Amino acid sequence: MIKHLFIALCGSLLAGLAGAQNIEATIKKNVEATLPDGAKVDAVRKLGVLGLYEVQIGGDLMYTDEKATHIIIGQIIEPKTQKNLTQERLDKLAQIKFSDLPTDIAIKQVKGNGKGVIATFEDPNCGYCKKLAKELQTVNDVTIYTFLHPILSPDSLDKSKAIWCAPDRAKAWNEYMLGGKAPDAGKCDTSGLDKSMALARKLNIRGTPAIFLVDGTRIPGYLPAAKLEEAMTKAAASH
């Protein structure tokens, strides 16, 4: 009796799993048919509210029904709690495993005991990156890994190459970001810079600065020193 019940339950679970997979495959197929330039759906998940499914395309989310007959683009908010469910999911999806970052292709700066750790993706032509550089001058006991991500201007890549090929990359970076002193153009192996740019694309970083805390949290933009230190302390405590 128990054996037969167990077999029936297993069969039911397998059927339910197959059904869910079929729904997700249908949604993926139907949504991809509407996307431009051969874009692909990265994941489909049952949302858990409103009977909707969450469709992930890169760093973006949209919602649909189980047959993808309608697509909803926007944010889902709980009125009672004012929780933005869409932003919570985006923040979760944007998290990384900090220890997986290839810090050997980043510009490393150690201030004080270097106990606090952050990673940034920055463009030398980014105004907010320059503001961040000034704010970081007042932050003590921190290790900063800066990944170059030249995307803003035609000469961003040239400036990044000059900084990358400088004898002291951290010094060249700070002299340019804080004082506008560009290093002399030099020649060197820029494969590390190429890898940094590829990593930024993989992480779907579309703007600079992008800051990552030690617990993997992504901060999409500039923060003043006080706010950044507060975020670093909170991340370290939960790490």
Image: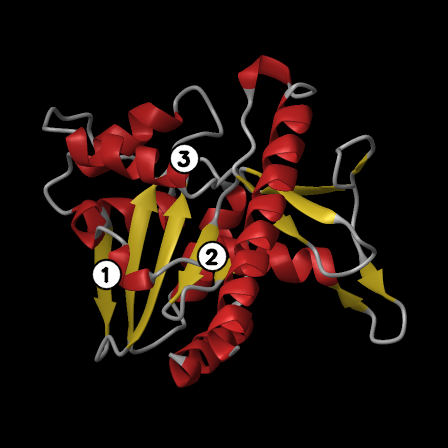
Identity of the residue drawn at 46% across and 73% down? 3
Q: Position of residue 237 (x, y in %)?
A: 41, 85
Q: Which residue is mark 2?
A: 132
- Per the model, the C-alpha gap separating discs 2 and 3 is 22 Å
Q: Which residue is mark 1?
A: 109
The quarter of the rendered structure image containing the C terminus is bottom left
Disc with the residue nearer the chain's start (3 vs 1): 1
In which quadrant of the rendered view does residue 100 lie? bottom left
Asked if 203 appears above or below 212 in the picture, the reply is: above
Is the residue marked by circle 3 packed among few (<14), some (14-19), or many (20+) residues within 10 Å?
few
Asked if 150 appears above or below 103 in the picture, the reply is: above
Looking at the picture, which amino acid does disc 2 mark?
A: Leu
On screen, residue 179 versus residue 53, left or right, reads left
SS label for mark 3: helix
Q: Position of residue 61 (x, y in %)?
A: 66, 43
Is the residue marked by circle 1 packed among few (<14), some (14-19), or many (20+) residues within 10 Å?
some
Asked if 7 appears above or below 201 in the picture, the reply is: below
| Total marks placed | 3
Q: Which residue is mark 3?
A: 201
Q: Position of residue 157 (x, y in %)?
A: 34, 26
Identity of the residue drawn at 55% across and 22% down? 39
SS label for mark 2: helix
Looking at the picture, which amino acid does disc 1 mark?
A: Gln
